[in-house]
Image: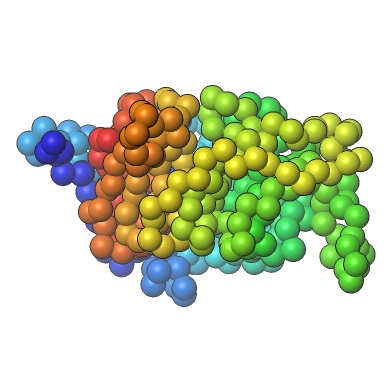
Amino acid sequence: MNRPPPSVLHTPGFAHYSLAWSPFHSNRLALASSANYGLVGNGRLHVVALGPGPGGQPGLGVEKFYETQDGLYDVAWSEIHENQLVSASGDGSIKLWDVMIKDLPIRAWQEHTREVFSVDWSNISKDQFISSSWDGTVKLWTPDRPRSITTLQAHPSCVYQALFSPHQPDVLATCSTDGTLKIFDLRSPAYAPSGPGTNKFTTPLTAAALTVPASGGEVLTLDWNKYRPFLIATGGVDKAIKVWDCRMVKLGPEAAQAPAVGGVCETHLAGHEYAVRKVQWSPHRADVLASASYDMTCRVWSTTPAPGGSHLMYIHDQHTEFVVGCGWSLYEEGVLASCSWDCRLNVFRV
């Protein structure tokens, strides 16, 4: 079956780290990028428009871009203001932008002491967003306050991603260098009992409602299923995508009293040849997810294949460098975007 080639946007000199589709406009994306692969130098936030292009294929164009002093690692659109978005930066800063305003952010926060690697806006408590950092913390913010509302000491090392549950306010999941997936309940903050050889005064860890030992290596990415509460996909250095049933989690006051360890691996998806950098469940189907990998591919998987059929549905292999981000269009079923260190954003139909 011949598929049309992807629509491509090239941003020379700026390697991509993350993309996000607007929740308000079906034809708008944001792209977080960094010069020199994010190792040193400045960053650029692109606002991208999807419009009619040559030969009936959709065309991609940069609506506007913002320069930043350090590389950008993630971006998330506001759930309350159609023109606003928040970015995560290598210098530990978080910036809020308004696409109607040129050049400068409308707000900036500097609390994290290391790189901010993820930002996520709540689709339930729409005035809140979270950030996660290499400093081991997750912070809760609201756009109108000058300081964070809450800080979780989530992991002893780098927190690659933190995401709100799409089903319950105050519940979020994190993944880390330490090989774990954790679920936290913001309503019951407490400190975890310290193990032997650790000092809870110098390294206090926030108690997780559930800790899932997800991998022997680093867990780089996670996503909540949009239809089945407490079903979470993870990916990381071990090259596998794992789907975790976390329904045994106890929330509220119970969570603080008896932090649990568990999680049932429901599905194990193998096929990527290098680390999995991003996973995202389809917003339209409960059994479909996409993944991006350092093996230069973006793949689409089904967790409910036909008898004798493969979990793997599709391989997009048009990139020439690490594929680090992928995201489903929220409006058009089957439209997927991928972004890569080859400085190319691809939009294609699965």
Q: Position of residue 180 (x, y in %)?
A: 67, 54
Q: Position of residue 319 (x, y in %)?
A: 26, 57
Front residue of 89/69: it is 89
Front residue of 130/333: it is 333
Q: Position of residue 120 (x, y in %)?
A: 58, 43
Residue extending farthest bottom: 40
Q: Quadrant of the C terminus?
A: top left
- Give the residue at x 17% y 33%: 52
Q: Is residue 242 visible?
A: yes
Left or right? Give the position of 21 relative to 167. Answer: left
Its colouring scheme is rainbow
- Give the residue at x 41% y 62%: 274
Q: Quadrant of the N terminus?
A: top left
Left or right? Give the position of 101 relative to 123. Answer: left
Q: Position of residue 157 (x, y in %)?
A: 69, 64
- Give the residue at x 91% y 40%: 257
Task: State which quadrant residue 94 falls in.
Answer: bottom right
Q: Is residue 73 visible?
A: no
Task: State which quadrant residue 293 falls in.
Answer: bottom left
Front residue of 78/309: it is 309
